[in-house]
Amino acid sequence: VFREQETAMALLRGRQHSPLVNWVLLATVCSLSLRLLSSAFAAPVFQVGRLNNHHGHFTVSDAKVKSLSLNWRSSAGHASAALILAGTAVTALFSTAFRSPKPGCRRAAEPRTRRHGWGDDVVFHQAQVKSNVEAADGLRLISIEAPPVVATPFAKAGQFVQAKPSADAKPSFYAISSPPGSEGPLEFLIKEAENNAWLTGTKNGDTVQLSPAMGRGFDLACESWTSADVNQVGLFATGSGVAPIRAAIESGALAGKVCRLYFGARTQECLAYADRFDDWKQRGVEVVPVISKGSDNWTGRRGYVQQVLKEDEERGEGFVLPSRHGALLCGQKEMVQAVRSVYAELGVPEDRTLLNF
């Protein structure tokens, strides 16, 4: 239907059709009417180029296409309006009578949870803080006793939970630091910051709201790793980003592989889990702590993890065999990009450098 009566209805009115054709046209208009009306809210302008029928076709150039309208003064306008209303009523009746709710959708009468994360409906559950201790300068190691509905989905290192202090608060995302399958509370390594103060300031017995464990985690069984039969792994973490790396190491998922961890922090006092380094070495993981600032008595590596990786490879002290090498990374975006850039120069494809988010 076009302005200035360049309409399909005008064309059809000027021709004589058999009753059967008229019924076909009526059914077509009825089925299209609701679709046009419902689409009007999303796209106010319609372009119609051609209307085909059994006897021929009618074409209008794009330049002449205008917004959908009706000439209410004409008989065609009245007939069109009646057809649209009839089509709307018939379609609505059939939709109400026969449409069933889509799988996974709730009925309107049921209460809906708030929508969080990447579009999924997230249900939160009460959990209790069991301990909150200092893990390093500016970092807290917090243990939380979570109900099975929260802990059971935790099956892969790198997964996380959404957490918030109360039902009406906005949630934050925290990677689980304890290994999957371990007994006892879930552990989290949390940076002390204003937006985390509600959690880093908790004490034994306080309650928090947690979602079930979620996320893909570090997918060591992905196609890029299995096809290359990865047997050596570079681990990269900065600050609290070591939390899911710890979970990967202590889960046993890296057993049998040659691993090296480049762990960056601002100072020596900011290195979390320093008391676990010896245990990680026993598990086959070489630990290379790197600090960007610090006292003169530090005898370890200085700078940034991506720089140290590149230095090791250039000096022949690296261990990267590109055809069999993979990596796990967690930390600042700039670090991740820089490490991937070094790997690209060494011939390790990006799809073998895995993130937990």
Image: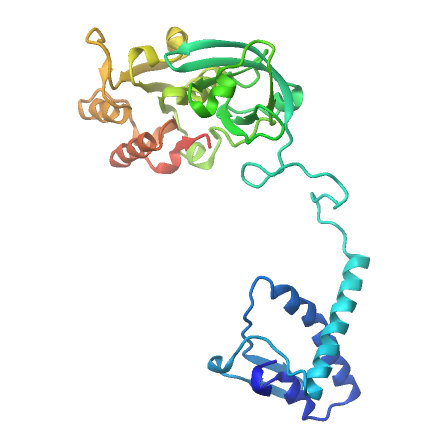
Q: Quadrant of residue 281?
A: top left
- What residue do we see at 62% from left, 34% from top? 122
Up/down of 222 relative to 283, above or below: below
Quadrant location of the N terminus in the rendered image: bottom right
Which residue of the protein is positioned furthest toward the left in this rendering?
Answer: 315
Residue at 60% over, 63% down: 41
Q: Quadrant of residue 91?
A: bottom right
Nearer to the camera, 278 or 8: 8
Q: Residue 79, percent across and down?
A: 73, 83
Q: Is residue 59 above or below residue 43?
A: below
Say if residue 115 shows up in the picture.
yes
Residue 254 can be seen in this image: no
Image quarter for residue 103?
top right
Q: Nearer the viewer, residue 222 or 75?
A: 75
**Relative to residue 42, is residue 292 depicted above or below?**
above
Q: Please indicate whether residue 170 sits to the left or right of residue 329 in the image.
A: right
